């Protein structure tokens, strides 16, 4: 994980970050590239670029070049670093998520087909109350463009249920869009008051029971969607980057696909930090299970049998 900026210029009514971390400040592009080059030299193969609103990187400090934002320019520079094989970033904002960034998913092979894209609500009235300066229609249009460029895209999101003033009609819009978009993963939050935010004076009028019920509706949708997509991968094989031992299971190790799906495999500690192909034989909503594909051994067997 490499931080590329600090602070935030957005004024989301539920968020304290702008007050605690100040205005957006971008690190020099050269310093970021140099840091990642150093990581690659030490064996790092995957890097995640971090920012409160990462796609706003450098828009006040650096010029647009050939209609490319500073963030897109940075992605191109990181993509050119030898040894780096996967690139991710988090978290972007619908504001400023332009075509130059969307097009990166079609022309930068190291950029993983995974995007964390916070929706927060499917109701335009609630988005306005949250001071999120976009509509759900705009949000969905960006996702549609993304899936046109990368049909195999995996998309996760953030949603807050029970924001002050959220009616059953507002939540029904959130449920509708959440289900229609088909998120692969989501961080679901039940609203709670944060002191010193602009939403704090609104209180917390939505009951705990209502929040729990709404949260569960979205969890059920998410679990069904995630299981269905994971099950489509059973019988296929993908390259997995192994992160370390699993919390449970003897000799079980955890890795992730390019689409950020969690994979558990019986393997050797020597695989940590390495890529290996895994054939999936079982799936749950949250995890893929499988076996290592020993391509060299398979080739020898094929030769012996031919």
Image (cartoon, rainbow, N blue to C red):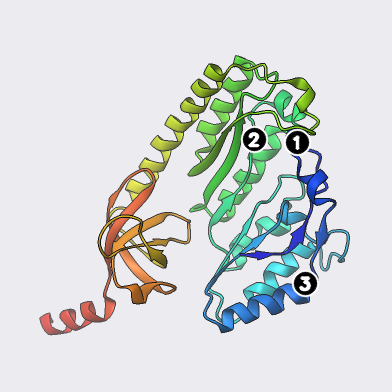
> Taking 281 as reference, is 176 above or below it?
above
Q: Is residue 55 left or right of residue 117?
A: right
Residue 301: x and y in percent read: 16, 80
Q: In 3D space, how far apart are the residues under numbered discs 2 and 1 (Cα atoms)?
A: 9 Å
Residue 274: x and y in percent read: 42, 74
| Residue bearing the label numbered 3 | 29
The residue drawn where x is 36% and y is 50% is: 287
The label on residue 132 is 1
Residue 278: x and y in percent read: 32, 65
* SS at badge 3: helix
Q: Quadrant of the N terminus?
A: bottom right
* SS at badge 1: loop
> Taking 252 as reference, is 205 above or below it?
above
> Between disc 2 and disc 3, whose residue precedes?
3
> Between disc 2 and disc 1, whose residue precedes?
2
> Dot 1 surroundings within 10 Å: few (below 14), some, or many (20 or more)?
many
| Residue bearing the label numbered 2 | 120
> Taking 72 as reference, is 302 above or below it?
below
Q: Are marks 2 and 1 in contact (CB under 8 Å)?
A: yes
> Between disc 1 and disc 3, whose residue precedes?
3
Q: Quadrant of the C terminus?
A: bottom left
Residue 4: x and y in percent read: 73, 64
Residue 172 falls in image quadrant:
top right
């Amino acid at each position: 994980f490499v931080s590329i900026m600090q602070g935030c210029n957005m004024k989301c009514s539920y968020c304290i970050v702008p007050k605690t971390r100040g205005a957006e400040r971008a690190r020099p592009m050269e310093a970021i590239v140099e840091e990642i080059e150093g990581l690659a030299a030490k064996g790092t193969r995957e890097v995640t670029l971090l920012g409160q609103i990462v796609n706003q990187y450098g828009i006040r400090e650096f010029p647009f070049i050939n209609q490319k934002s500073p963030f897109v320019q940075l992605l191109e520079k990181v993509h050119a670093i030898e040894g780096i094989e996967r690139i991710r970033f988090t978290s972007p904002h619908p504001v400023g998520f332009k075509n130059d960034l969307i097009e990166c998913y079609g022309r930068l092979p190291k950029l993983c087909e995974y995007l964390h894209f916070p929706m927060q609500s499917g109701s335009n009235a609630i988005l306005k109350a949250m001071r999120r300066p976009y509509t759900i229609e705009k949000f969905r249009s960006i996702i549609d463009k993304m899936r046109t460029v990368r049909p195999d895209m995996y998309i996760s999101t953030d949603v807050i249920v029970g924001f002050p003033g959220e009616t059953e009609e507002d939540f029904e819009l959130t449920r509708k869009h959440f289900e229609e978009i088909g998120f692969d993963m989501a961080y679901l939050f039940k609203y709670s008051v944060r002191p010193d935010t602009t939403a704090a004076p609104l209180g917390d009028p939505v009951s705990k029971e209502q929040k729990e019920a709404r949260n569960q509706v979205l969890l059920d949708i998410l679990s069904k969607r995630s299981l269905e997509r994971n099950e489509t991968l059973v019988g296929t094989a993908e390259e997995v980057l192994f992160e370390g031992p699993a919390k449970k299971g003897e000799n079980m190790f955890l890795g992730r696909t390019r689409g950020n799906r969690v994979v558990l495999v019986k393997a050797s500690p020597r695989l940590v930090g390495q890529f290996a192909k895994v054939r999936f034989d079982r799936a749950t909503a949250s995890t893929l299970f499988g076996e290592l594909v020993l391509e060299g051994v398979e080739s020898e067997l094929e030769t012996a049998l031919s």
